[in-house]
Amino acid sequence: MTATAERPTTTIFRRPSSTTGLWSWLTTVDHKRIGIMYGYAAFSFFLIGGLEALLLRIQLSQANAEFLTAGAYNALFTMHGTTMIFLFVMPASAAFMNYLLPLLIGARDVAFPRLNALSWWIFVFGAIFLYSTFFFGTSLAPVGVDGIGGIDGNLAAGGGPGTFNFLADSPDGGWFGYQPNAGPLYSAGTAMDYWALGLQIVGLASLVSSVNFVVTVLNMRAKGMRLLRMPVFAWMTTVTSFLLLFSLPIIAVALFMVTFDRQFGSLFFAATNGGDPILWQHLFWLFGHPEVYILILPAMGIVSEILPTFSRKPLFGYSAVVFAGAAIAFLGFGVWAHHMFSSGITPVAQAAFGLATMTIAIPTGIKIFNWLGTMWMGRIRLTTAMLFAIGFVAMFTIGGLSGVTHAVVPSDWQQTDTYYIVAHFHYVIFGGAIFGLFGGMYYWFPKLTGRLMNEKLGKTHFWLMLLGFNLTFAPMHWLGLQGMVRRTWKYAPETGLEPWNVAVTIGAFIIALSILVFIYNWFTSRRRGQESGLDPWDARTVEWMVPNPTPEYNFAVPPVVGSLDHFWHLKYDQDAEGRAVRKPDGDEIVARIEYEQLNPAEPIHLPNPSYFPVLVALGLPIMFYGIIYHETLWGKALIAVGAIITLGSLIGWGMEPLEEPHHVEHEDHDQVGEASFDG
Amino acid sequence: MSVEEHTHHPTPAQYWKIAVVLGVLTAIEVAMYYINDAYNLGALNAVLLIILAGLKFVIVVGFYMHLRYEKPTLNRFFTAGFILAMALYTVVLTAMGVIAIRGA
Amino acid sequence: MADLAHEMDLGHPEHESTGIDNRKLGMWAFLSSEFLFFGALISNYLLYSNRAGFTGVYPSEIYDIPFTSVSSFVLLMSSLTMVLAHNALSRGDQGGTRTWLFATAALGAVFLGGQVFEFTEFITLYDMKLTTNPAASAFYLLTGFHGTHVAIGVIMLLSLWGISRRQGELSEKHGMNLELVGLYWHFVDIIWIVIFTVVYLLSVPPA
């Protein structure tokens, strides 16, 4: 296709063109590279969040310990939660969604490749901005207010007695930032501003992504890839994107309100001036509850891909699993006040939300039974990926059961703010989402690298992690019911809570050990792992119809999809009893697919790299630093500079075509996977 | 892209007429405000004003944003967002006592 | 086969499964999320606007309805000029497009000027600032964010106008951008339709 009438050059810079080296990663618009970057960033934050947890656990392993100061403790649990949720699980899910979505639907990239890069850069700059609080944030002792006793002198500036006080000047209002505690009066200083504005930035990244994914799924599917033929992970990506699309604006407003209260003196949550603290809770949880489904649905999608592959059976009740996912998301918008049962909402509200919460167990149960049905009578192969998927089903079920007990309102009044709740959400987020993510890492590793991860090390990782995880979180159920309170830096020896807390801490260190095994496995397998070939798992879905590692262009020849599990049906027939029988020429079919995909008949034109996403993103943290210090002259200057960078780059972007006119062919048909990351 | 050009578009004259309708609706709204000031119509005032605003809303969305002539997918997005927002915030305002319903 | 492979190229999305252009679908998706954004701001205002017991003046005590009616009318008419700009472009009338784009931006700027004037009056004459009480905070946050959206819209309109002047015409790509900016602009207008009614005409201070 010839370029149409000359496109005037309106960009200021020459378009970047490198395909290797650091610049290529800074300017890439390739969804696979973006996914890889998300993955490494997310995992780094996983390690940081894990260290934060270990510090907390050391403090709690002994009654009346003063290993951490109270101030440091509060900061660590705040940052642990914030990091794990916003900087690990969400971007890790994004890594999978980014890398896989186009492959799963037979497309070459997402609908808006530069917007995709923008999401990534906004995320990483936002995460760095948030963490810069460790260096720049301040957390001052609460200002005494007449009529409110006990504050003055109770907590010395910096965190109080204890050995480890480093980090006491960081955000310490909890990951949920309840107001007015995390407001200007009771959390003076800048730490909570870094928290609020940092979350604002990373939230924007997810919102931009969600628009991208929704349009991609609706518009970019290969021929024959009807919506109800898409792999479940593609469906869960879509559902998650809708959840993000509709819930992020709510937290954005709430975070703006908190920022305005803290920076500009507005009175949204200022209780002494008539502000309503409950308003914060409603707005936060209106987002916060859909958020937990955002955390779990992608992992549920991963499990729905792994189980059928290693059971050698189709997913039991594909449509039911898909619709159950959509139902969970929809119902998930209606239950937020179950986080507020003890906040003083009316009995009618409590009953309504309690009932609504129970209904979510129905679609969840449908999924669990369908996963079990998938495995039933299957020819199971217990690869590491499969172990993690089965582990997900078991651990998530346990977490779900404790969740059902929370739905019973009077029971929740006992459980709330105790370690019982901590047990619940770690079973579903860790035993659920994180196990699912690890399973995905083992399963799709070949797509990234062309190699397999070591199975022995993988199984070691799994069993150590399963042991450590259960040792850490199971005791929290009864610790909570025995009265161990959340978010409290010490407990007295008379409570008798110490012995099990020691066990919990040991469990936490076992988890850490298992992660070291994983990291070792990941890096050595990248270099020396067994080569995987096109189809190492004898898989079912179209992402396995491209060579490993994935070529830059994804599909040389787009698939024309005839059914659900299209790849499987290319390789297998059914016998009279409905059992799968490999076609006699199955291996040749696979070999031919590999050959076709490796040797495109025509030059393939991909969207060109671009500077603008990283530039637009860069302006945001600059502006937000300026907002925190807006009372100074240089703070005001930063706001202006950041705004100009973002705005100017947006205009430049608007004038840049997605693809430059084609006069140069891509000479490198090298398969670009991780191998190019030579930075 | 070629599909778009074949869908129906109102003519400039029709756009002007719609603008006149919008102007008239606004004028009625403002008049209602003063009538209510004088005669205090109570709930009726709110209902009428909301209906008038609703009409303006639907007219701008349907004709100016062209939703009336677009594929249903776009309508579904828009309606979904609108209904979700209405539902969620109605519940919040009820729970916080701004909207009073018996017993809640 | 080659056609199919070429069809996958992102620069030329000839087969979009829904038949709706990617960018248009994306804009509608984004706009539908904005309901949740403005809904929160409006709910916040409704929560505080007639709550008793605040010090200082309540916004609904000091509205200047005639003034705001005029600026609301101005914004409403800017939707007309916007749609005339789009219509002109579809007929290939580049000069007309430019005129109507500029008119839309101008009307938007007039609206913003009205907001600035209104806020200045509130602050200087009635001492109602962001920090006066929660009702005032809610009013300023809501109208402030709406105004910011209008300002961003004006910038986008002027950018398109500038590109059209510089290049002599809006290419097909920029034509789609005009349609997208139009959708955004109308959305900002309908939010104001709601705000004008709910915030200005309907809200009352506490008894």
Image: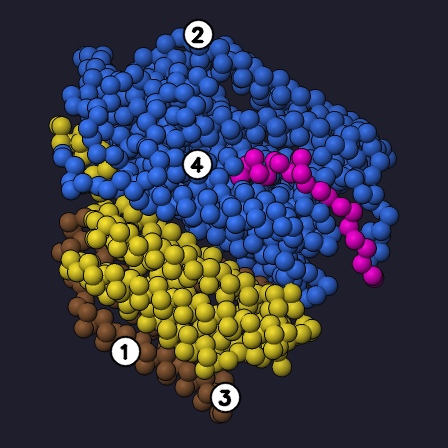
Question: Disc 1 vs disc 2: which is toward the camera?
Answer: 1
- Name the residue carrying label 1: B20
Marks 2 and 4 sit apart, C-alpha to C-alpha, by 34 Å
Marks 1 and 2 sit apart, C-alpha to C-alpha, by 74 Å
Specify the subunit that label 4 lies on.
A
Quadrant of res A5: top left
Q: Quick check: A313 above or below A82?
A: above
Specify the subunit that label 2 lies on.
A
Amino acid type, callout 4: Val
Marks 1 and 4 sit apart, C-alpha to C-alpha, by 46 Å
Q: Which mark is residue B37?
A: 3
Q: Which residues are magenta?
A: A126-147
- Name the residue carrying label 4: A614
- Name the residue carrying label 2: A528
Q: How is the image coloured?
A: by chain
Q: Is residue B74 left or right of residue C31?
A: left
Label 1 vs 3, first from the N-terminus: 1
Tell me the SS state at disc 4: helix
